C-alpha cells in the first residue's frame, strides 16, 4: 500500500497513473478499480477561488457515489487538470483527457471565454462536456444554432440572460417595492459573459421600475475605480447594478474607502466566496449579490449537508461552481444509469432527460427548440437563484422570501433613498 | 470640480508610481541591473502585509512593517540568488551578462508570482488602510488614505534625496553610479555599495507595495503590469535618472487619470504607452537620460 499525498498535484498525477493502468490504489475498495470505471475529466482554475472548488466538489460527489457501490457496480473516477485560467491550456487538457486518459465526459471551467474555446473541441472529439460556472448565452445558443454539431455541450449554470432576469426579479421586490428606488446605473466588466448580461439588464430593469441612467463598462484589469465611482455618482442613481466576476475585491474596497453613498446590487461572483469578507477587510458589508446557493441556506435539503461536508473535508466553504460541479457528477451518474452506457450519444439523450434535485434547485435542461438548448432551466420550482447580502462579515440570504433570513442592512455611508 | 477631482486623484496615483519607479531606477543607475522581478517584490510586500493582518491578526502598523521586511528579504534574495551569481560567473561572457540578469530576474519574478498564487490564490487582496474615513477638499470627497499615501510617498522620496546627497554612504552610492572604477580606486568596496543600494531598493519597493495594497489592492496578476509600468516610467524619464523618473511618474499618472475621467476608464493606459513610443522616436535616451 503506497502512501497517498492529498495535494492538487496528486490528483493530476493520479489521473495520469490511473490512465496508464498502473493500478494505484485509492481510498475506494480494491474491487472499485473495475476495468470500466466511469471516467470524468475535470478541467478547472486551481488558483482561483471559484475554480478551486470544482475538482474538490466533483471528487466529493464521486467518493459518495462510490461508497454506495457506484453506478451499477461501476465506480466513478475523477481525473483533474489545472488550466491556469487559460483557454489554450484548457484545450490541451481536453485533448489529453479524451485521447490519452479516455474520459467519458468532461466538467470544465467557470470562465465563459474558456468554455467557448472548449465547445468546438467537445464536438470534434465527440465527448459530452458540462460547464459548472460559465454564463455566456453563446454557449447554449450555439447548441441551438447547430444541434447536430454542438449537442455535446451542456450548460450546467444559469445563462447571462437568466442571471439578469434573476437580478431584476429580486430588484423588483427588494429595491422598488421595499425601498421605493427608481433609477440605476449599470457597472460591468468588459467580458464575454457580461455582453448578454447587460442586454438583459437594459431590457428588464426598466420593466421592474428602475430607469437606467448610465451604463459603464470597464476593462477587467482596472485597478483604480475612483473615476468610475465618481462618474456613477454624478448620474445620481438610487442603486449601482453590478456585473463583475474577474474583479470584485478592488471595487468593493474602494467603494467603502471612498464612501460611495450608493448601494451595489447584482452579480458579483467574488462576493459568493466565503473568504471575500477577509479579502476585502470587511469592506464587503452591505454588498448585495446574486447566487445560486449560500452557506446555511437550504435551497434544497441537499444544500446545507453538502456545504458542511465540503467545509469539513477541505477547510473552506465551496464557491458557487463547487455546488454545480457536485450536482453535475450526480446527474452524470444518474444519466449513465438510465442510459445503461457511457456511449456519447446515449449519454447525451439521457442527460437531456435529466430531472435531478441537486444543491441549487431542480435541474432540467432546455430542449432542442428552445433558444438556450442544453442550458439549465430558470424559474420557480426549478432554479431561481438567491440574493444574499454581506452583513457583519456573514453572507445572509435576503431573497426570495422562502429562504430569506434578514432584511437589507447598509453601512452608515450608504444613503438609501426612500422616495 | 472635475478638474479638482482629476488634480487630487492624479496626484496620489502619480506619487505612488514615483515611489515604485524610484527604487527600480536607482538599482539600474548604480549597478546597471534592470530588475524585472520588481512587480513581484511589490506584490509580495502587499500580500505579506495582508496575510499578517488577516491571518496572524497583527495591527495595521505591524502588518505594514512585516510587508516591508518581506520586500527587503526578497530584494537581498534577488541579489544573492540571481544577480550576483550571474555577474560573477566566468562562463557567461561579460557582454551577455545584462541579458542574463534581465532573463534571470524575470523568471525569479514569475516564480514569486506563482508561489503567491499557489498559497494565496490569484484573487485580489487589500491591506487595511492605516487611516480610514474621508475628508472634503473643496467639495471633492477624498479618502484620508489617499492623502496619507501621497504624503508617505513624498516623505520617503525626500528621505532618499537626503540620504543620497547629504550622507557619506549616500555620496558613495552616487559616486558609484557615476564611475564604479573610480570608487574602487578610492578604497571603497563596490560590493558593500551594492548591498546598500539593494537594501534601499527593498525598503522602497516594500513601502510602495504596501501602500499600493492599501490604496488600490493587488493580486498575483498585478506582477506583470507593475513591472511594466515601472519599466515604462523609467524608460520615459531616462534610465538611471531619479529626477527623470519622478517627472515621468507624474506625466504617466496624470495622463492616465485624465483619460479615465474624460475619455473612458477602459482606455486608461493607452495614451501613456503612445507617449512612450513617441518619446522613444524623438528622444531615445528619455526625458532626462544621460546614457
Image: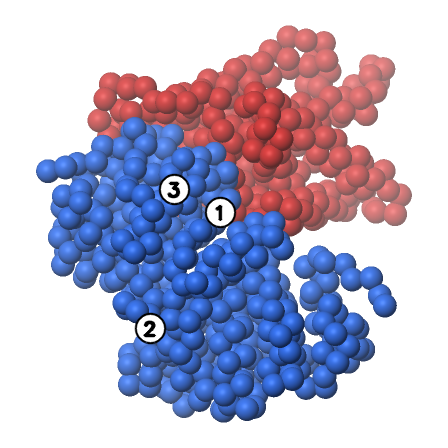
Chain colours: A blue, B red
Subunit that carries the residue with mark 1:
A
SS of the residue under disc 2: loop
Instruction: Give whichever of discs 2 and 3 has the lower sequence position.
Output: 2
SS of the residue under disc 3: strand
Determine contact: label 2, label 1, CB under 8 Å.
Answer: no
Q: Are marks 2 and 3 on the same chain?
A: yes
Instruction: Give whichever of discs 3 and 1 has the lower sequence position.
Output: 1
Residue for point 27% across, 53% down: A401
Q: Quadrant of the C terminus of chain A?
A: top left
From the top left corner, tell me how far across and down residue A15 is, in percent: 70, 72
From the top left corner, tell me how far across and down residue A370 is, in percent: 28, 81
Whether residue B228 is visible to the viewer of this picture, yes or no, is no
CA gap between label 2 and label 3 equals: 27 Å
Q: Which residue is mark 1?
A: A274
Q: Identify whether A29 is placed above or below A396.
A: below
Subunit that carries the residue with mark 2:
A
Viewed as shown, does residue A231 lie left or right of A347? left
Q: Which residue is mark 2?
A: A377
Q: Are marks 2 and 1 on the same chain?
A: yes
Q: Which residue is mark 3?
A: A390
Amino acid at each position: 500500500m503506497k502512501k497517498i499525498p492529498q495535494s492538487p498535484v496528486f490528483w493530476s498525477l493520479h489521473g495520469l497513473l490511473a490512465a496508464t493502468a498502473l493500478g494505484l490504489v485509492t481510498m475506494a475498495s480494491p474491487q472499485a478499480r473495475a476495468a470500466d470505471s466511469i471516467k470524468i475529466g475535470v478541467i478547472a482554475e486551481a488558483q482561483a477561488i471559484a475554480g478551486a472548488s470544482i475538482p474538490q466538489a466533483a471528487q466529493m460527489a464521486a467518493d459518495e457515489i462510490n461508497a454506495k457501490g457506484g453506478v451499477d457496480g461501476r465506480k466513478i473516477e475523477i481525473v483533474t487538470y489545472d488550466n491556469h485560467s487559460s483557454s489554450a491550456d484548457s484545450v490541451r487538457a481536453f485533448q489529453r483527457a479524451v485521447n490519452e486518459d479516455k474520459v467519458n465526459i468532461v466538467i470544465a471551467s467557470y470562465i465563459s471565454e474558456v468554455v467557448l474555446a472548449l465547445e468546438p473541441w467537445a464536438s470534434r472529439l465527440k465527448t459530452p462536456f458540462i460547464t459548472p460556472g460559465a454564463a455566456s448565452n453563446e454557449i447554449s445558443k450555439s447548441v441551438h444554432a447547430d444541434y447536430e454539431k454542438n449537442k455535446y455541450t451542456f450548460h450546467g449554470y444559469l445563462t447571462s440572460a437568466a442571471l439578469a432576469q434573476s437580478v431584476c426579479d429580486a430588484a423588483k421586490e427588494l429595491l422598488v417595492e421595499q425601498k421605493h428606488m427608481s433609477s440605476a446605473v449599470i457597472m460591468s466588466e468588459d467580458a464575454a459573459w457580461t455582453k448578454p448580461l447587460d442586454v438583459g439588464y437594459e431590457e428588464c430593469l426598466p420593466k421592474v421600475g428602475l430607469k437606467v441612467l448610465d451604463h459603464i463598462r470597464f476593462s477587467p484589469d482596472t485597478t483604480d475605480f475612483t473615476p468610475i465611482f465618481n462618474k456613477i455618482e454624478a448620474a445620481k442613481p438610487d442603486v449601482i447594478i453590478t456585473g463583475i466576476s474577474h474583479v470584485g475585491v478592488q471595487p468593493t474596497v474602494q467603494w467603502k474607502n471612498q464612501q460611495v453613498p450608493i448601494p451595489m446590487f447584482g452579480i458579483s461572483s467574488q462576493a459568493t466566496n466565503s473568504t471575500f469578507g477577509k479579502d476585502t477587510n470587511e469592506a464587503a458589508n452591505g454588498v448585495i449579490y446574486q447566487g445560486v446557493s449560500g452557506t446555511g441556506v437550504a435551497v434544497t435539503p441537499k444544500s446545507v449537508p453538502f456545504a458542511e461536508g465540503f467545509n469539513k473535508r477541505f477547510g473552506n466553504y465551496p464557491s458557487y461552481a463547487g455546488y454545480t460541479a457536485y450536482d453535475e457528477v450526480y446527474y452524470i451518474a444518474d444519466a449513465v444509469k438510465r442510459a445503461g452506457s457511457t456511449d456519447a450519444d446515449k449519454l447525451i439523450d439521457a442527460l437531456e432527460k435529466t430531472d435531478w434535485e441537486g444543491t441549487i434547485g431542480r435541474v432540467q435542461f432546455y430542449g432542442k427548440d428552445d433558444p438556450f438548448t442544453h442550458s439549465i432551466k430558470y424559474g420557480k420550482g426549478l432554479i431561481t437563484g438567491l440574493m444574499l447580502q454581506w452583513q457583519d462579515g456573514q453572507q445572509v440570504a435576503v431573497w426570495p422570501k422562502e429562504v430569506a433570513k434578514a432584511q437589507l442592512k447598509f453601512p452608515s455611508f450608504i444613503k438609501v433613498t426612500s422616495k | 470640480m472635475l478638474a479638482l477631482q482629476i488634480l487630487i486623484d492624479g496626484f496620489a496615483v502619480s506619487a505612488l508610481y514615483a515611489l515604485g519607479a524610484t527604487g527600480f531606477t536607482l538599482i539600474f543607475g548604480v549597478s546597471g541591473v534592470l530588475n524585472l522581478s520588481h512587480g513581484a517584490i511589490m506584490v509580495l510586500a502587499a500580500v505579506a502585509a495582508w496575510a499578517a493582518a488577516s491571518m496572524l491578526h497583527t495591527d495595521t502598523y505591524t502588518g505594514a512593517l512585516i510587508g516591508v521586511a518581506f520586500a527587503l528579504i526578497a530584494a537581498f534574495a534577488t541579489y544573492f540568488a540571481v544577480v550576483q551569481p550571474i555577474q560573477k560567473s566566468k562562463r557567461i561572457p561579460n557582454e551577455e551578462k545584462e541579458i542574463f540578469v534581465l532573463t534571470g530576474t524575470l523568471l525569479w519574478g514569475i516564480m514569486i508570482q506563482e508561489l503567491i498564487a499557489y498559497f494565496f490564490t490569484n484573487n485580489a487582496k487589500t491591506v487595511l488602510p492605516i487611516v480610514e474615513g474621508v475628508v472634503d477638499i473643496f467639495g471633492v470627497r477624498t479618502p484620508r488614505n489617499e492623502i496619507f499615501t501621497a504624503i508617505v510617498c513624498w516623505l520617503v522620496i525626500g528621505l532618499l534625496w537626503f540620504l543620497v546627497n547629504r550622507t557619506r554612504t549616500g555620496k558613495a552610492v552616487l559616486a558609484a553610479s557615476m564611475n564604479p572604477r573610480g570608487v574602487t580606486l578610492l578604497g571603497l568596496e563596490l560590493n558593500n555599495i551594492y548591498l546598500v543600494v539593494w537594501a534601499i531598493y527593498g525598503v522602497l519597493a516594500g513601502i510602495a507595495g504596501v501602500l499600493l495594497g492599501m490604496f488600490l489592492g493587488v493580486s498575483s496578476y498585478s506582477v506583470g503590469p507593475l513591472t511594466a509600468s515601472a519599466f515604462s516610467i523609467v524608460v520615459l524619464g531616462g534610465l538611471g535618472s531619479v529626477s527623470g523618473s519622478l517627472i515621468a511618474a507624474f506625466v504617466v499618472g496624470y495622463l492616465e487619470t485624465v483619460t479615465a475621467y474624460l475619455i473612458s476608464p477602459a482606455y486608461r493606459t493607452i495614451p501613456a504607452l503612445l507617449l512612450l513610443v513617441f518619446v522613444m522616436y524623438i528622444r531615445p535616451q528619455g526625458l532626462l537620460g544621460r546614457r
